Amino acid sequence: MFEISHLHPMLVHFPIALITIGFFADVLSLFFTKKEPCLSKVGFYLMIVGTLGAVAAFLSGEYFTHEYSGVLGEVKERHELFCKIAMYVMIAASLIRIYLVWKKKTNGGLKWLVFGLYFVATVSVGYGGLLGGTMVYNYMINDTPYINNDGKEAETNAMKTVENMKAALQGETTASAKYAAFAQKASEENLPQIAALFKATSKSESIHAANHHKVLEEMGYKVDVKPEAFNVATTKENLEAALKGETHEVEQMYPEFLKQAKADNADNAVKSINYALGTEEKHMELYQSAIDALAANKTSTLASLYYVCPKCGFTYSKDDVEESCEQCGTTKDKYFVVK
């Protein structure tokens, strides 16, 4: 079904082709003026039609296309800038060219000025077209949901990393809520040390979720997720479930996501994933220690105070806390204190 937003892609290819072909016709006319006088006329008429096409394409893009944020928004802004330059330069060149034809002036400085403007417009429209192609082929194919700044849903392509970051965001959001519920259960079972551990890891996972969310926004995606359904059992079973989840993230999920992010040159995603991966390895150690202490009926030996880095989520007990985070360098005075 036709939508008004389809008008721009329907029009935009004409000025690119007309301006480019017209310019090369003008270039050839410099060498074959006597033998092929029609080349100059071809360049002139294509210039006029190309200018009208550029105006139509620019206006349709300005008023009938979606607004984007993040990386996609930045590419769109550059695309608009170079297309605007091409349009204004073509208008100026066309007006001068029409004047020269009207006055029948085939030589002189104005002729070379027009030629120079034509060249600038050709380069600008070519680069603008390249940016437009980048938007389409890098961001707008395979149609994944995207929410515009104005709140309207549009379509944009995601690299595989975007889908991975969405999955990671969903997982960390759920884990944060789940561990908070596990902490409440541990308190009810009179296991304050394990409750403190779950509170700390819940806070840590919320930081990972926030980092992943920020990366997605920087990539041009606004995603709103809620925790998935989960079960709360006994503290022993909750610890085992938590360890199983962390093990999956450390051994399978995050290594795969990290490999893909590197392949996609998604540097911010790489950093966010590395922060989460390193932290989940520490969580595995903490959960295994808690499981062992619970089995030996020695939970009182577990730490009751934890520190969580606000930047990367790395989690320290009071026994191994460092003056600065081993992952991101954040100083201890900025840590969240959980007990």
Image (tube, rainbow, N blue to C red):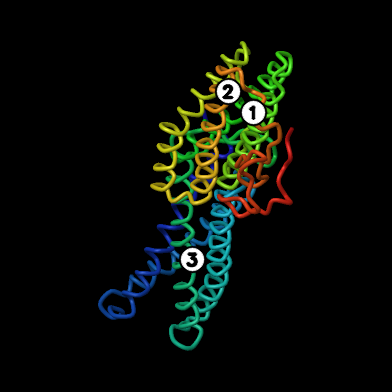
Q: Is residue 91 above or below residue 209?
A: below
Q: Is residue 262 above or below residue 171?
A: below
163 sits to left or right of 337: left
Give the quarter of the image for residue 24: bottom left
- Please state which amino acid type lies under the numbered disc 1: Thr
- Please state which amino acid type lies under the numbered disc 3: Ser
Quarter of the image containing the C terminus?
top right
Give the quarter of the image for residue 177: top right
Q: Is residue 135 above or below residue 106?
A: above
Q: Residues within 10 Å of mark 2 (few under 14, many from 20)?
A: some
Front one among 248 and 285 = 285
Query: Which sits earlier in the primary sequence, circle 2 or circle 3?
Result: 3
Q: Pointer 2 and pointer 1: residues touching (CB < 8 Å)?
A: yes
Front one among 63 and 321 = 321
User: Which type of secondary structure does the marked residue at label 1 adopt?
Assistant: helix
On residue 124, the disc is 3
Circle 2 sits on which residue? 293
Q: How many marks?
A: 3
Q: Residues within 10 Å of mark 3 (few under 14, many from 20)?
A: many
Front one among 76 and 309 = 309
- The residue lying at 58 percent from left, 44 percent from top is 215
Report x, y in % for residue 122. Answer: 44, 67
User: Which type of secondary structure does the marked residue at label 2 adopt?
Assistant: helix
Q: Is residue 258 above or below residue 127?
A: above
Report x, y in % for residue 15. Answer: 46, 57
Report x, y in % for residue 300. Answer: 67, 25
Marks 2 and 3, how far apart at CA:
68 Å
Q: Residues within 10 Å of mark 1 (few under 14, many from 20)?
A: few
- Please state which amino acid type lies under the numbered disc 2: Ala
- The residue lying at 44 percent from left, 42 percent from top is 258
Circle 1 sits on which residue? 301
Query: Which sits earlier in the primary sequence, circle 3 or circle 1?
Result: 3
